[in-house]
């Protein structure tokens, strides 16, 4: 098959959900991937924050092969026990905040959030959920309802009722909205899709205290920030906040579709058989891959690499901001979740296109921002190669090309 044929088939047979990029990727290795014509690309998106160990990681293929030779899906699925699942659960205990002792596996981040919202309503006997402006929690009807961005919501009205929104990083507004009808507050510890918004130091801890006082549960959405993306295993570990639920996906299995939510003993005590489930939940294949990925993150000091590479990237980005203040409004990041905020959307679009033409994938977010979130084991020379392409794209930017 050629790129032209692939694009034709996909375009003819897929619903028009994505504004596609005309590149057909055939294979990958580490931070690089190649299209059908053999052109090499450097991936600064890690498949949207997923391939934390890079593309085609042998850690993952070996785990897949080994487990698939044993068993892929249990008889009667979650009703039967699995040593592979038990091994992953034990490892999760080591890395999760200590109050989160019960873990359930899902297939995606949206599914984990959806379950947390549903279960919080049951446990508290309340209906309302508070979320934040510019948040992103998924694309199911309940998680789109919890997402604070008009573009993900307005086409699907009426959404689920009983959702309220407050500005992110605004304690007063949250306090004002917390009342006895609030079942849960759902928050990202750093807003990813919202443009890498990092809250103040005591924000999450204070929210956690407010929720406790109000009898509301705190759902921390670590789908994007978890598994060392921001440095520590979970971004919440930087704080003393005590979530009642913590939701996970993306980096949890390095590219294999998998997710999870963890909950406290007190919350789990108020749940019963039949409250939740799913055909593939805790599927041994996903558990084996997730175990191998998390083990690798722990055993290869990936956290230290994320911190060092994130610091280096931010130093470069600070220089860009100083050199091109007419183009760049802000740069920010935590670990390897980074963003360059341009003065306007047209600039971000053109820079992103110039990067792609030079073989670098980046991700435009919120119109005028570009997110950089490469594999967590990226080497310094690979990071610098991508940053050099990015800088060159800024230098080559010409407003008239976009018709601005
Ligand atoms: C913070 C956050 N929550 C939830 C989701 C949804 O996860 P999934 O696409 O696996 O359903 C995403 C996806 O980008 C996310 O960034």
Image (spheres, rainbow, N blue to C red):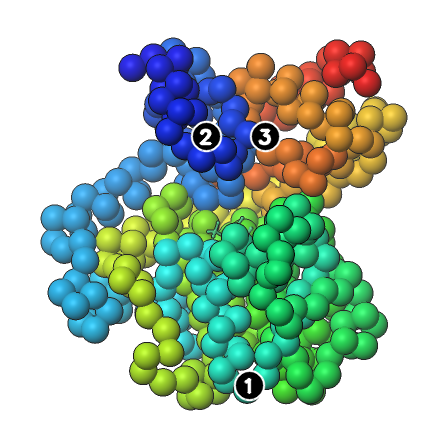
Q: Position of residue 13 (x, y in %)?
A: 37, 29
Against 223, residue 171 (above or below) is below
Report the residue at 43% width, 41% height from top. 51
Which one is in front, 157 or 290? 157
Report the residue at 37% width, 78% height from top. 275
Q: CA distance from mark 1 to mark 3?
A: 41 Å
Query: Disc 1, disc 3: CB below 8 Å?
Result: no
Left or right of 246, for residue 281: left
Q: Position of residue 149 (x, y in %)?
A: 68, 51
Number of residues whose C-alpha sits closer than 10 Å to that of mark 3, classed few (under 14), some (14–19) or many (20 or more): many
Quadrant placement of the C terminus: top right
Furthest residue to the right?
326
Closer mark to the observer between disc 2 and disc 1? 1
Number of residues whose C-alpha sits closer than 10 Å to that of mark 1, classed few (under 14), some (14–19) or many (20 or more): some
Identify the residue under disc 1: 124
Which one is in front, 269 or 209? 269
Number of residues whose C-alpha sits closer than 10 Å to that of mark 2, classed few (under 14), some (14–19) or many (20 or more): many
Q: CA distance from mark 2 to mark 1?
A: 44 Å
**Sequence-wise first label, 3 or 2:** 2
**Sequence-wise first label, 1 or 3:** 1
Q: CA distance from mark 3 to mark 2?
A: 12 Å
Report the residue at 33% width, 34% height from top. 56
Q: Is residue 17 visible?
A: yes
Identify the residue under disc 3: 362
**Sequence-wise first label, 2 or 1:** 2
Query: Disc 2, disc 1: CB below 8 Å?
Result: no
Q: Position of residue 144 (x, y in %)?
A: 57, 56
Identify the residue under disc 2: 31
Instruction: Report whether the residue tagged 2 is closer than 8 Å to ligand 1.
Output: no
Q: Is residue 212 visible?
A: no
Where on the picture, by quarter, is residue 391? top right
């Amino acid at each position: 098959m050629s790129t032209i044929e692939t694009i034709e088939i996909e375009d003819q047979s897929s619903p028009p959900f994505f504004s596609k990029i005309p590149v057909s990727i055939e294979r990958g290795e580490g931070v690089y991937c190649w299209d059908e014509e053999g052109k090499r690309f450097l991936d600064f998106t890690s498949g949207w924050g997923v391939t934390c160990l890079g593309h085609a990681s042998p850690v993952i293929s070996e785990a897949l092969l080994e487990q698939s030779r044993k068993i892929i899906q249990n008889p009667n699925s979650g009703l039967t026990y699995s040593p592979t699942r038990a091994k992953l659960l034990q490892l999760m205990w080591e890395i999760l905040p200590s109050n989160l002792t019960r873990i359930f596996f899902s297939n995606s981040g949206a599914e984990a959030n959806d379950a947390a919202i549903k279960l919080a309503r049951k446990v508290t006997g309340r209906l309302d959920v508070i979320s934040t402006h510019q948040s992103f929690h998924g694309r199911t009807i309940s998680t789109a309802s919890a997402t604070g961005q008009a573009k993900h919501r307005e086409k699907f009205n009426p959404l689920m009722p009983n959702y309220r929104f407050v500005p992110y990083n605004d304690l007063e507004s949250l306090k004002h909205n917390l009342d006895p009808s609030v079942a849960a507050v759902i928050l990202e510890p750093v807003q990813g899709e919202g443009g890498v918004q990092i809250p103040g130091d005591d924000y999450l801890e204070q929210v956690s205290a407010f929720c406790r006082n109000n009898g509301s549960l705190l759902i921390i959405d670590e789908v994007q920030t978890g598994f060392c993306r921001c440095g520590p295993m979970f971004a919440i570990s930087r704080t003393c906040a005590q979530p009642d639920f913590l939701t996970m996906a993306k980096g949890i299995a390095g590219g294999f579709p998998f997710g999870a939510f963890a909950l406290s003993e007190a919350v789990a005590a108020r749940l019963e058989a039949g409250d939740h489930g799913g055909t593939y939940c805790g599927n041994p294949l996903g558990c084996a891959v997730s175990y191998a990925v998390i083990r690798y993150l722990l055993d290869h000091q990936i956290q230290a690499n994320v911190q060092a590479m994130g610091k280096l990237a931010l130093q470069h980005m600070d220089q860009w901001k100083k050199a091109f203040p007419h183009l760049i409004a802000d740069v920010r990041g935590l670990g390897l979740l980074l963003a360059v905020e341009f003065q306007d959307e047209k600039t971000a679009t053109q820079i992103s296109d110039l990067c792609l033409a030079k073989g670098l994938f980046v991700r435009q977010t919120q119109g005028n921002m570009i997110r950089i979130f490469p594999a967590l084991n990226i080497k310094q020379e690979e990071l610098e190669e991508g940053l050099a392409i990015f800088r060159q794209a800024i230098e080559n930017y010409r407003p008239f090309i976009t018709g601005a």
